[in-house]
Image: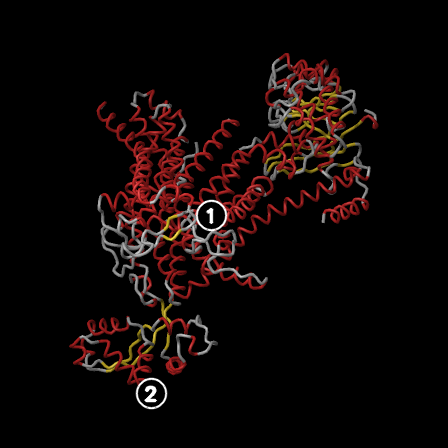
Amino acid sequence: MARFDKIIKGYFFLCAAFSVLITVLIVFSVLFESVRFFNIVPVWDFLFGTQWSPQTAMRADQAGSSGSFGAVPLFMGTVLITFIAMCIAAPVGLFSAIYLSEYAPKKTVNSIKPILEMLAGVPTVVYGYFAVITFSPFLRGVGDFFGLSIASESAMVTGIVMGIMIIPYVMSLSNDAMNAVPQSLKDASTGMGATRSETVRLVVIPAALPGIISAMLLGISRGIGETMIVVMAAGLAAKLTANPFEAVTTVTVQIVTLLVGDQEFDSAKTLAAFALGLTLFFFTLVLNVAALFISRKYREQYD
Amino acid sequence: MKNKDIRMQAKGLNVSYGDKQALFDVNLEIAKNKVTALIGPSGCGKSTFLRCLNRMNDVVDSCKIDGIVQLDGFNIYKKKVDVVLLRQKIGMVFQKPNPFPKSIYENVAYGPKIHGLTNSREELDKLVKKSLNRAGLWEEVKDRLEDPGTSLSGGQQQRLCIARAIAVTPEVILMDEPCSALDPIATKIIEELIDDLKKKFTIVIITHSMQQAARVSDYTAFFHLGKIIESGETKQMFSNPRLKRTQDYIAGKFG
Amino acid sequence: MIKRTTKIAMKRAKKKKNPFKFKLGSSKKNQVHLARRHARERRFRVFGFSAIAASMIFLLVFFASIIADGYSAFTQAQLRIVVTFDQSLVEKGNYRKILQNSLKQQFPEAKGRKQRFMLYKLVSKGGVNSLRKLVDNNPQIIGETDQVWLPASSLIDMYVKGKTNNEVDESKRKIKDLQIKWLEELQANNSVRSVFNTAFFTNGDSREPEQAGILGSIMGSIFSIVVCMLISMSIGIGAAVYLEEFAPKNKLTDLIEVNINNLAAVPSIIFGLLALAIYLNFFGMPRSSSLVGGFALAMLVLPTIVIASRNALAAVPPSIRFAATALGATKVQVTLHHTIPYALPGILTGTILGVARALGETAPLLMIGMVAFVADVPTGILDPATSLPTQIYLWADSPELGFVEKTSACIIILLLILGIVNGTAAYIRKKFQYDW
């Protein structure tokens, strides 16, 4: 009996350990290939170079055979698109959460929330398709009307659609944070004669701020790591631009372009994808862990 | 009670939450500059009644209120009544001390700020000092106004909440078992404070302690199962209740 | 804006005598202040409502546009052609020639190579297979002449569905005037009909839009999901049980917890890189196979399952565990006999939600090559395959007009499946969850 218990317990432990193994495997596999890449291209050139043209030539003696791997345009593109996305997702998500937690009657909340959560269940490839087929032509039409020329693959289109994708995450996490603010605090404010919006602005939001910040950080992390929407809608042009109506490319887009299709595993081109993956993993890790600790601290405060 | 001594009055008040009726035809007069105590076993509707007096029940979706509650002869449930102004006139102190997670100063300044009661920082400082003074807290906190309100002891927190409530110069203060979360010493301080406050404010207080009701209140209303069983002067009710049920409750035979 | 609303509020206030309107703020300054506060309150409320409304409207536009684009893919135009089953050609197996000859006979005015080529383009290339099947099932037809309904080419299909732009100059469009004329002739004879598009559900991928189907990608999705579920459930539930029931409270447990929470937010493409480096390059597993896809997805949904299962386990009240322990059960017995069974509905719900996520996931599958053109329907987990989302990605990239409706239709199917899966999760939660 005791042996059986030990075996079962051991199995459970191995399962838990496996989850750590996944992280270790991620770090090692990505790091290993990245180190090989940095042997060919110096870290410095990768992180601060402004030229991205990974197309290596057919023959080694051809000019420019090494390609150039300055990732700054990709970082800029990622930041630009994520910024646009958060400009949509942060206010809409936050105000939706406020409306749901403080204004809407319970019945309405119970019917609206699942519908909004459907947005979170839609696969991102579908968002990408929507961006390309419906939203991009629409926005270009609007642009033409105002005499603006918008590229068919623009940061704007991608960012807005990505923002819509992030809304439910921001909404649901900040809603949780606001619902965790004790009713007694809201009552105290209402009892003083504060209007609902004053209670929200002066009491609820300050008290829920850590939760809201962590929701925003997770939203940003999701935006940075999002792949399908940008692959389908953002394009491949590694341009260093802050113009949201131009096409830009992102880290994830380049990972996909470098790795999809035939590949030899030793060229700088394929290895570059892993270096990009490492960068991506690092930045999202920082954001996720920061969000995790902020919201944890906050939970302790009200326990 | 003479008409001019009445500050608030409930007439034929019926309240229900969904299908469950919480108050049945409640009639009560609340005297000006006196302390009225609401007593009764838990779930008897006294808290519901108190929350009707400044329309805090409006926040609850399922709550339905029928009847009249008057403040100085004016029905506060009339359609066009501005609840914001109403609640400024009728303040509230809750069962558990609930200071905002802000500084002591900001807690007291919250009401005057949202209502725009002061014109300058000096005026606001003065008002905060006056309110804290009146709540008997000034001497204890004057050197640490910037500390968070939550850093105070339970009794001090409750007095902070009282200071917060009186900073907007209400006419009536509603207190929902303000001492139930406090130790005897803190309770005594609050009781003395209540005695002092009634010079300026009309106070309605819910309490579970018969002794407290006897000590602090001028009038008492006894609630049971959503109805007022008996109400009148506290002295008379505690010494010589008209009904057997009141006597039993006061004597602690049920509760 | 503020000034106007203030004025309106003050006007309203003057009309009615109401002490709670402005009595306290009888000074003009206070009246203005209060009116402003109410205006701000209204604005705030409008913002909140608009935010919700915006999401709702988007959802509506989104579904409407997908359905509007995609519903037509469920039908397919067919043309009735008089076919002569020439014996010698049947024996040679040259059904293409049979079809071409029949078309030539029906439209003798098609002169020259170019026009004849246009003529052949009326009927789908799949029509050849239809003829072959017809002969196989019904050999006495050889040598006869019969009217046969054949699938129209995508070009004609699109025209019949009204998806082509016929206003532009002939040189700028794919469908030519001559073809339209022939089609109108057929329509006059009642020789054009629209039928339910079975090929869409029974075929694998194809270069020809009218022959492309989703069966291959559906099978790929099923295979990889089964692999994913087997792995992620057995490991995920075990990990959750360990963390919730057995783990001592120490730094290591804390680290595992942070790690799992972080994994849940790692971009999915990273899991693709991992699968590529480990499974394909290190272990040399077959590229594009559902097996590797399932492995990648399993790691992706593992944290989701662990977190959901832990919540379900934590919801089982300690008193149940005490009761069993007091009867002399060991910790493992308590867990296996009581805690896990009671938490099972919650665990299942979490797992199904994880599966729903895996079903819609695309990026990691791109990395391991489940995005190649695969015409054959996969029959096992080692066959090269695509999945529904990668099929959407592939078709969305195809330039042919016919693939637009196919992509949208594929999205409709995927969303339907996700709806059913999520609905099942909600049903289980409602029906079986214990209310402690």
Compared to residue A156, the image places residue B215 above or below, namely above
Is residue C17 visible to the viewer in this orientation of the structure? Answer: yes
Evaluate whether label 1 is on the same chain as label 2: no
- Look at discs 1 and 2 and give the one toward the viewer: 1
- Residue C424 placement, left or right of B255: left
Residue C180 x/y as whole percent: 40, 80
The residue to which callout 1 is attached is A76
The kind of residue tagged 1 is: Met
Residue A211 x/y as whole percent: 51, 35
- Of residues B177 and B246, which is closer to you in this image? B177
Chain at tag 1: A
Compared to residue C425, the image places residue C144 above or below, namely below
The residue to which callout 2 is attached is C109
Compared to residue C367, the image places residue A205 above or below, namely above
Which of the 4 image quarters holds residue C144? bottom left
Residue C307 x/y as whole percent: 39, 36
- Of residues C81 and C387, which is closer to you in this image? C387
Residue at 34% in and 20% down: C326
For the C terminus of chain B, which image quadrant?
Answer: top right
- Residue B174 placement, left or right of A286: right
Residue C332 x/y as whole percent: 29, 26
Chain at tag 2: C
